[in-house]
Image: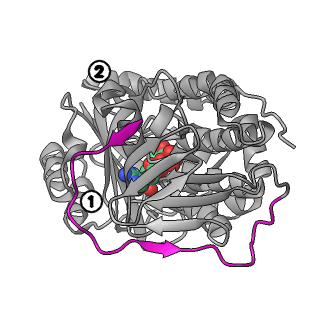
Amino acid sequence: MTHRLTDGTAPHPAPRTTRPAPTTALVPTDRRLAHLTVLISGAGVAGPALALWLVRYGARVTLVEKAPALREGGFAVDFRGATHHTVLRRTGIWDEVHRRQTHMGRQTVVAADDRERVDLPAFFMSGDVEILRGDLSHILYERTRADVEYVFGDSVASLTEDSEGVDVTFERGAPRRFDLVVGADGLHSRTRRLVFGDESRYLRHLGHYVAGFGVPNHLGLHRTARIYTEPGRTMMISNYGGDPTRAGVALVFSSDRADHHRHGTARQKEILAERFAGMAWKHAATALDGLQSAEDLYFDAIAQIHVDRLSQGRVALLGDAGYGATMGGIGTGTALVSAYVLAGELAAAGGDHRAAFDAYEAEIGAYARNCQKSSDRVGPFLAPPTERRIRSRDRVYRVLGSRPMAGLFKKLTERPAGGLTLKNYG
Ligand SMILES: Cc1cc2nc3c(=O)[nH]c(=O)nc-3n(C[C@H](O)[C@H](O)[C@H](O)COP(=O)(O)OP(=O)(O)OC[C@H]3O[C@@H](n4cnc5c(N)ncnc54)[C@H](O)[C@@H]3O)c2cc1C
């Protein structure tokens, strides 16, 4: 079976490879996968988390990442409920995640003149524990870099599978062969495109976009956020602790066009500038000034991925590549949970990928899709289309933040994330 990508990319410098050091940091707890070589595409959250588990079971792992270095951008991501707690503990990152948590405080919806209208309950945005996405990615990378071969600045170009393994060609590096390949390369996964077909078959655009970038902390915020909404567009400025001189700007806007995220950064900045021009909030113009010089712009559609199956032959999908949702879909918690399950099922099956991928599908499919559903209405909720809807959203915020409702609300938001009892894989 050959899956070759035909849209060639411009030549790049040679990929940067970090080979595992001879002494391993993650001493394998057992050797059930010692005979297995695995290529993972994508060093976001899901990829390094899977690598960590596979190495513990003795597998030899190569992780190829398109970016020239670890992508440490993004806003905060949070964990909520029992399943997330368990996976953080078993992965062994509970303490470090808590040490680096944001401790986010008040997040306040404001009027155009910055008058405070309603405070959001911290749990609503920040879960039980919240950490910057980049910090989490960094923790996982640091835990695995001594045992995993990281190849930055390269990407899979073709996958050819036979009964014994998968031949892989890369855009820059020399061809290689692996027993298994896992696509953890995000919402716009190339692995998925190569093996399952064009993205248009799997990506469901939900009518909104999200963008984020860093600016100077003009508002002097400290572990707080201010949120301003006009019909169809929202701006949030926050400081997550850490560097007191920096703030993050998050933008959400409605658009029926499903292709904005395909443009380069310069065009994306133009789209954002056009879409947010004339915003009445007194701090909006200064925040938008920072957009032009931002070097860390994150911009994507609020979208979901729906595939029929999470694997085909020796190739499996993990994280956003298989069941992603850009925002509100509990993607990071689901990525850690799924990485734990996929590696665990491979270990339980002694590396038999057929049995393991079936079990992974059975264990994670419904859970991940249920989590994904939380993002169904996130765009219209964050950026309602009319003034009337903005008012009614704020009334919902007020009710949910009130003491009698807070406990019930916490339970409701935890329900999808907590909907899986994790097996113990030994
Ligand atoms: C820069 C960035 C910022 C983000 N910010 C937020 C945020 O603020 N809030 C939030 O909820 N979610 C955010 N996300 C998404 C969030 O990380 C995921 O929903 C979740 O953590 C699941 O992670 P993932 O590893 O499946 O996907 P991702 O975290 O998206 O990681 C995918 C990785 O694959 C790499 N990749 C892509 N294509 C290729 C290729 N062809 N070959 C090799 N590698 C490739 C990407 O560079 C990336 O490192 C962000 C993602 C990125 C990449």
Name the residue rendered at 49%, 32% in the picture. 323
Indicate whether 62 appears above or below 157: below
Query: How many angstroms separate mark 1 from mark 2 (CA)?
Result: 26 Å
The mark that comes first in sequence, 1 or 2, is 1
Q: Give yes or no for residue 241 being in the magenta stretch.
A: no
Give the percent coordinates (x, y) of residue 129: 66, 49
21 falls in the magenta region: yes
Label 1 SS: helix
The answer to whether residue 286 is left or right of residue 357 is left
- Measured from the top left, where is residue 212 in percent x and y? 35, 53
For badge 1, the amino acid type reads: Ala
Residue 92 is at least partly visible in this image: no
Whether residues under marks 1 and 2 lie with C-beta atoms below 8 angstroms apart, the answer is no
In percent of the image, x 43 and y 25: which residue is there?
306
State the extent of the magenta-drawn residues as a range.
1-28
Q: Name which residue type carries label 2.
A: Arg
Q: Taking 32 as reference, is 343 left or right?
A: left
- Residue placed most toward the observer, 36 or 22: 36
- How far from the left and from the top, in percent, is residue 112? 27, 44
Q: Which sits in the foreground, 91 or 406?
A: 91
| The label number, if any, that marks residue 1 in the structure image | none
Q: Nearer the viewer, mark 1 or mark 2?
A: 1
Q: Which residue is mark 2?
A: 388
Q: Quadrant of residue 406?
A: top right
Residue 372 visible to the viewer: yes
Pointer 1 residue: 287
